[in-house]
Structures are given as structure tokens and as C-alpha cells.
Image: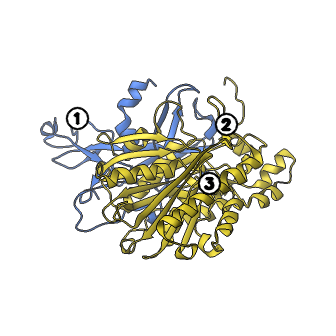
């Protein structure tokens, strides 16, 4: 992948930056320019709002990769899962910090920040989200009365009063 | 220095995998158990193939920001201290800043001073915050260091890091004093392009670690008007488990004072992260009114010392979010040397 192409995707890969329809409040990841589910979807054109995913979710389905693509040989076997985030969007990512045999459908996970691949020994290093098992201690505390932006587990600020 | 400046929040991260000195010695035909006992290192942490100083720093800082409910856009400076930055040229700090949502209105840079780059970053942040140039400054000490296969360093060099948010509001531990002690002492180095560091063997002891830590601690207590009895906790840089315990005894500290600050026996030497993870472990249990002495050390050589006072704010601070340091010390998954060699890139691969 070219440096420029990956760099353009940094907000998504580093921080799970999605978008939300201002009318029906459906959340999308990656972000898109129009809401396809709205009855008045034309009204969403140009009005989709940036929306930060929390990084929390659960495994919908997964596979164990034994024959890895180039650049991932050192990590086999590893679990590759489709994760349904609490905000709705489903995304694909590795599940780390767990024996692959212990990954199961319904496993609660949180986004973690890992190295995705390297462009050889001299090239750029790509970073982004993967998923790790989540316990209650990694659920950001609710702070009633605080309305300013606070960080999310996925990195970038999220409105403390918004989101599920 | 300004009496209201100090630590607002903190977070630590240690990778999941562990290897024992016995297992390392088994491969090299040496008595690994005796080596571990001599170094007072039971296990050391090993980063997964997809972890490095950038990912460790990011995890530690994300924990700190959530615990302290800190808006990353209020961070004015991020400095990452490490001797294992993934790039020789391209900052670790910019990736970390982007990954926590702190960009673009901040300054960021990488520090290197062997094992004390993280404490040097704290001093820099204290200056910026104290001068009211930034609201929050972030100092991170993080490493994924390596010793050459079979070298004594291989029994202790490990991976981990801790992040500290420095500010003047909601301070959980005030930094009352800081001093440094620096000389040109070539006890440990790594030349440009070299994969593994070199060291002066026994020369790393008396003229290097012990002289600098002792002198710096004495200067710190002299300036603060304290004695060893003044402190509830003390944290020394810990290249192994033995050096900090010996220097602590020499300075007049008890095992009880060193208990929480000593983490290397359980996770190995995390280099720039070592003293800072020890401090994070202390803050995990500290009570209001506790005085804490921290003395870092970096080869080359220098020591930075801090006299901290834990404030009443720590009772309101959320220490429940994230993994407590004690769990990193107790937990982990042990791996054999072959897996360790694969994870750490010690195996020559086809096409490489």
C-alpha cells in the first residue's frame, strides 16, 4: 500500500473515526457521504456528521488464519473477526492478547492500537486498530455532569454525553 | 519550582508475553536460574510481533487520558523517551499524538537518554506547564529493548512503558523538587546501525549506576530538606532487581519503602519505562500525604530525581479504569525461547 493511501486512511485506522446521519442517527464506519437508509436520504448529502466510535463491540463471527498473507507470517495462527461495535457498524480486525482457540462468537472486545504491517525493513510502518478481550475495567467511566470532550478507548475525543 | 505543578494522570502498559531466565539459559547452555537469581529477575516481558514503542506508548497514554478525563485537544506537548524508537528518523511522538487525538495543535518530539529519557521528558513538561506555555504536557517512557543473544542483557531487557500527564489542575501528585546529576560515563551504548547495545560489564555498576543514583538522591534530599524516613515510597531505576535494592539499602531505605516501586523482578528491565512503571505502581496504592522519591538513571550517564507529594485529589481520581500495574506483574503468558526468538526478529527469514 502506498504511503499516501494509508496516510489518507489514518483517522479511520488510528481512531475509528466514522460518521452519523443527522436525521436517522445511523452510524457508519468507514464514513460515507450519504445515508442510504434514510427515507429522506437526499437530505443527508453533505450533512453527515463526524462520529467517533468507542472501540467497544462483540465478535459476530471469526476465523483462525494459519496461512497468512505476506507480512503477517510472524503472527500465525491468529484470529480474524467481524466485530459489531456498540454503535452499530461491523468491522473486521484481528483479535489479539488471547489464544486464538479461546476466541468465540459473542466475545466482548475493545479496540487496541497495534502495528498492522511494515513495508519491508526500510519502508514505512502501518499502525491501526485491532481488538483485544474487554473486561469491565476497560469500560470508560460515566461522569455525570461532564459535558466537555473526553478521550475514548479508540483515541480521539468523543462527546461525553453522546453515544450509547 | 511552582508548587502546584505535578502529575494529573498516569497509565502503564506491559505486553502480555513472558520468558524466564531459566528458559533463556537452557538455550545458551548456562545456568539461567542462577543468572536470574543473581539479577533478581524472575521473568521478563516480551512484546508481541505487532507491538513496539509506539503501540506501548499509545496504550499507556490512552489509559491515562481516560482515567483523568482529559480532553486530548488540551495537550500542548507530547514527548516520548525511548532507546527503541521504531524509526531512526520519524518521530514516535507524532504517531502517538495522532492515535490519541491530540493533533495538530501541539508540539511533539522524541527523547533518547538510555533508560532515563522518560524522566527527562517529565522535567521538560514540568518546565512547559510551570511556565504556562501548555495546559497539559505528556511524558512517556517506553521501550522494547533487546540484548544480544546469549549476552547478560538478554536475561533482563524487556518491554513496557508508562505515560504521565503533567499539569496544574486536579494534580494527584505534586512535584515539589527535581534535580539531575549528569556526567560523560560510557557504561552502555549502541552505535548507529547496530542492532544490539554494548556495555562495559562491571563498569555499569559503581562508576555509573551507583554513583549517579546515589549522588542524585543525596542532592534531592538535601534540596528538599528530607531524609529517607520522610518517604512512604521510593522508586529507583531498575536495570535488574539487584541494583535498586542495593542502592536503596546504601541510602538508608527499607524494603517496605521500595516494595511497590520495584517491578523489574517480575517484568524485567523496561529501560525508559522501568522507573516510570514503578512510579505508576506506587500511585496505584498511594494515599494522600504520601511523599515519594523517584530517582531515574540513564547510561551515558545521568540521573533525574523527583520529590513528589501525593495530594487529596488522588482520592477523587479514577484508579479503577484499565489494568493495574500489579496485574501486569502477576499476569502474562510464558513462552519458550523459540517463540521469543521469532517474536523479537532474531530468526533470519528467507528474503530478508
Please give the name of the residue rendered at 26% of the width and 59% of the height, measured from the top-left corner.
A160
Can you give x and y, in whole percent of width and height, for residue A26 in the image? Answer: 24, 48
Chain for numbered disc 3: B
Residue corresponding to mark 2: B345
Badge 3 density bin: few <14, some 14–19, many ≥20, Cα 10 Å: many
Quadrant of the rendered image containing residue B102: top left
Chain letter, yellow in picture: B
CA separation, marks 2 and 1? Answer: 43 Å
Which one is in front, A149 or B161?
B161
Residue corresponding to mark 3: B212
CA separation, marks 3 and 1? Answer: 59 Å
Quadrant of the rendered image containing residue B144: top right
Q: Quadrant of the N terminus of chain B?
A: bottom left
Disc 3 with disc 1 on a shared chain: no
Disc 2 with disc 1 on a shared chain: no
**Numbered tag placed on residue B62 in the rendering:** none
Q: Nearer the viewer, mark 3 or mark 1?
A: 3
Give the vertical position of B274 relative to A62 (above or below): below
Closer to the chain start, of discs 3 and 2, is 3
Chain letter, blue in picture: A
Please give the name of the residue rendered at 78% of the width and 61% of the height, measured from the top-left corner.
B37
Residue corresponding to mark 1: A33
Disc 3 with disc 2 on a shared chain: yes
Under circle 3, the secondary element is helix
Q: Nearer the viewer, mark 2 or mark 1?
A: 2
- Residues marked 3 and 1 touching at CB (< 8 Å): no
CA separation, marks 3 and 2? Answer: 34 Å
- Residues marked 2 and 1 touching at CB (< 8 Å): no
Amino acid at each position: 500500500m502506498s504511503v499516501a493511501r494509508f496516510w489518507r486512511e489514518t483517522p479511520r485506522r488510528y481512531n475509528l473515526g466514522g460518521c452519523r446521519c443527522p436525521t436517522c442517527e445511523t452510524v457508519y464506519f468507514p464514513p460515507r457521504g450519504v445515508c442510504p437508509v434514510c427515507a429522506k436520504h437526499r437530505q443527508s448529502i453533505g450533512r453527515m456528521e463526524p462520529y467517533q466510535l468507542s472501540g467497544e463491540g462483540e465478535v459476530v463471527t471469526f476465523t483462525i488464519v494459519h496461512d497468512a498473507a505476506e507480512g503477517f507470517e510472524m503472527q500465525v495462527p491468529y484470529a480474524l473477526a467481524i466485530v459489531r461495535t456498540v454503535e452499530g457498524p461491523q468491522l473486521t480486525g484481528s483479535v489479539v492478547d488471547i489464544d486464538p482457540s479461546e476466541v468465540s462468537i459473542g466475545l466482548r472486545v475493545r479496540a487496541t492500537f497495534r502495528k498492522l504491517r511494515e513495508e519491508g525493513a526500510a519502508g514505512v510502518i502501518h499502525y491501526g486498530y485491532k481488538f483485544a478481550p474487554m473486561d469491565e475495567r476497560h469500560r470508560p467511566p460515566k461522569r455525570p455532569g461532564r459535558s466537555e470532550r473526553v478521550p475514548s478507548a479508540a483515541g480521539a475525543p468523543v462527546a461525553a454525553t453522546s453515544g450509547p | 519550582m511552582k508548587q502546584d505543578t505535578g502529575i494529573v494522570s498516569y497509565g502503564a502498559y506491559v505486553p502480555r508475553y513472558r520468558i524466564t531466565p531459566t528458559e533463556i539459559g537452557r538455550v545458551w547452555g548456562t545456568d539461567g536460574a542462577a543468572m536470574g537469581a543473581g539479577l533478581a529477575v524472575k521473568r521478563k516481558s516480551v512484546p508481541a510481533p505487532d507491538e513496539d514503542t509506539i503501540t506501548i506508548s499509545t496504550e499507556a497514554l490512552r489509559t491515562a487520558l481516560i482515567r483523568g478525563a482529559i480532553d486530548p485537544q488540551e495537550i500542548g506537548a507530547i514527548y516520548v523517551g525511548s532507546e527503541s524508537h521504531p524509526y531512526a528518523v520519524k518521530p514516535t511522538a507524532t504517531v502517538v499524538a495522532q492515535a490519541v487525538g491530540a493533533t495538530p495543535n501541539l508540539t511533539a518530539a522524541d527523547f533518547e537518554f538510555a533508560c532515563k529519557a522518560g524522566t527527562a521528558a517529565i522535567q521538560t513538561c514540568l518546565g512547559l506547564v510551570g511556565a504556562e506555555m501548555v495546559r497539559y504536557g505528556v511524558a512517556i517512557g517506553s521501550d522494547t529493548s533487546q540484548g544480544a543473544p546469549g549476552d547478560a542483557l538478554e536475561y533482563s531487557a524487556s518491554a513496557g512503558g508508562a505515560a504521565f500527564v503533567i499539569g496544574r489542575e486536579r494534580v494527584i501528585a505534586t512535584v515539589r523538587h527535581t534535580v539531575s546529576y549528569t556526567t560523560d560515563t560510557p557504561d552502555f551504548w549502541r552505535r548507529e546501525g547496530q542492532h544490539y547495545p554494548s556495555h562495559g560489564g562491571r563498569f555499569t555498576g559503581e562508576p555509573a549506576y551507583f554513583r549517579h543514583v546515589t549522588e542524585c538522591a543525596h542532592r534531592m534530599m538535601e534540596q528538599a530538606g528530607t531524609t529517607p524516613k520522610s518517604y512512604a515510597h521510593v522508586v529507583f531505576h531498575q536495570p535488574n532487581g539487584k541494583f535498586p535494592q542495593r542502592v536503596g539499602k546504601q541510602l538508608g531505605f527499607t524494603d517496605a519503602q521500595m516494595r511497590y516501586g520495584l517491578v523489574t523482578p517480575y517484568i524485567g528491565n523496561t529501560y525508559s519505562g522501568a522507573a516510570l512503571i514503578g512510579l505508576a505502581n506506587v500511585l496505584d496504592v498511594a494515599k494522600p500525604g504520601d511523599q515519594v522519591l523517584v530517582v531515574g538513571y540513564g547510561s551515558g550517564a545521568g540521573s533525574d530525581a523527583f520529590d513528589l507529594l501525593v495530594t487529596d485529589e488522588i482520592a477523587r481520581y479514577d484508579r479503577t479504569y484499565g489494568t493495574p500495574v500489579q496485574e501486569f506483574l502477576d499476569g502474562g503468558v510464558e513462552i519458550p525461547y523459540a517463540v521469543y526468538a521469532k517474536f523479537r526478529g532474531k530468526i533470519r527469514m528467507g528474503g530478508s
